[in-house]
Amino acid sequence: MHLSDPFLSVGVGVAFWAISGGALARVGKKLDKEEDSSLTPLTGVMAAFVFAAQMVNFAIPGTGSSGHLGGALLMAYLLGSRRAFLAITSVLVVQCLFFADGGLLALGCNIFNMGFLPAFVVYPAVRRWTNSDGKPAAVAVVMGGVAGLLLGSLMVSLQVALSHRTAISLLTLLKFMIPIHLAIGLIEGLATLAILSFLVKVRPTLVPSSRPGKASILPWVVGLVALLLGGVVSWAASKDPDGLEWSMDRVGAAPVHHAWQTFTTHLAPFADYQIPSLVAKFGEGSKASTSVSGLLGSVLVLVLAVGVGVWLRRRAQPKNPSQ
């Protein structure tokens, strides 16, 4: 559900840059006061996992559309709202700057829609429902996945309508956005539940948002899965348009040329998840190019998320009075 620049006005894009930037600043201030840094490695590998998982689009039967795991709700259960927001922001920044996915003007909107809403609106609401053993209630997790996608699709529709870049009305767009994202959200919720259920079995103290031990091998396992998803499983990704693209096609939304999109495309070195040197050798859409994009993107996201976490940790450390 990455919103792209052509559908946004500069005013709406800048406004959500300010909103998301303010949220990130507040999260940073809260995190740099935390003494426990044991979640930093897991934050990095979970961000890499979500980047790789988002490359694997799954088809929505009977629609001609596809979707992918958003991941913010899953990370909120494992990391808490603040670290999940930081992790999904790292994913979206790398996707935008390196792969031209979403657009630079739309980055603030995408961070708000795909990060803030699931982490700070949906997760706090659904985490209250737990089983008697303290584990997440299955229905709450699934409904959380649905709610996150529906809220995101509603916000995307509002952002497009406020931008007036297309003549399509808000109600017309919602007629397509809501049903298709309801289906995608259901799969998101079921996938989140499946992953959480597996983690509960292998590490019962991890969910929800418990602190793993410093010697945990979980980050290594998640990192390996991320590499497999980005490097191999991404070959099988559906070629159908995602829910947002599918909806725009159905309503005939065709915005005029947007200079921001041109800028973003030229700025990103691996636009459309294609490695230029590999495209020249093996052709566009080759498995080699897809694999390298997945692996490279996962590593970049890991480095960014961990780097920010380490920076926040160092900033929080008291300075030596003797210095």
Image: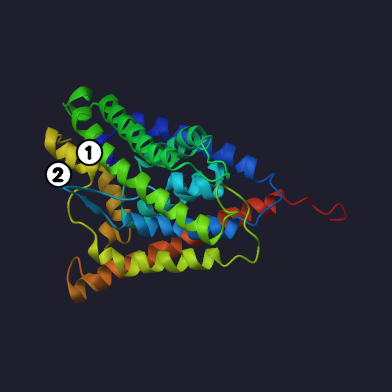
**Which amino acid is tagged 2?**
Thr
Residue 77 vertical position relative to residue 158 in the rendered view, above or below: below
Q: Residues within 10 Å of mark 2 (few under 14, many from 20)?
A: few
Whole-number angstrom distance, CA of label 2 to CA of label 1: 8 Å
Q: Residue 66, image x and y in percent?
A: 22, 49
Q: Badges 2 and 1: C-beta atoms under 8 Å apart? A: yes
The residue at 19%/33% (across/down) is 176
Q: Residue 47, image x and y in percent?
A: 46, 55
* Quadrant placement of the N terminus: top left
Q: Secondary structure at mark 2?
A: loop
Numbered mark located on residue 95 in the image: none
Report the front residue among 9 and 197.
Answer: 197
Q: Residue 237, image x and y in percent?
A: 24, 60
- Residue 156 is left or right of residue 61, and the answer is right
Q: Which residue is label 1 attached to?
A: 180
Q: Secondary structure at mark 1?
A: helix
Report the front residue among 33 and 272.
Answer: 33
Numbered mark located on residue 63 in the image: 2
Q: Residues within 10 Å of mark 1 (few under 14, many from 20)?
A: many
* Quadrant placement of the C terminus: bottom right
Report the front residue among 274 and 178.
Answer: 178
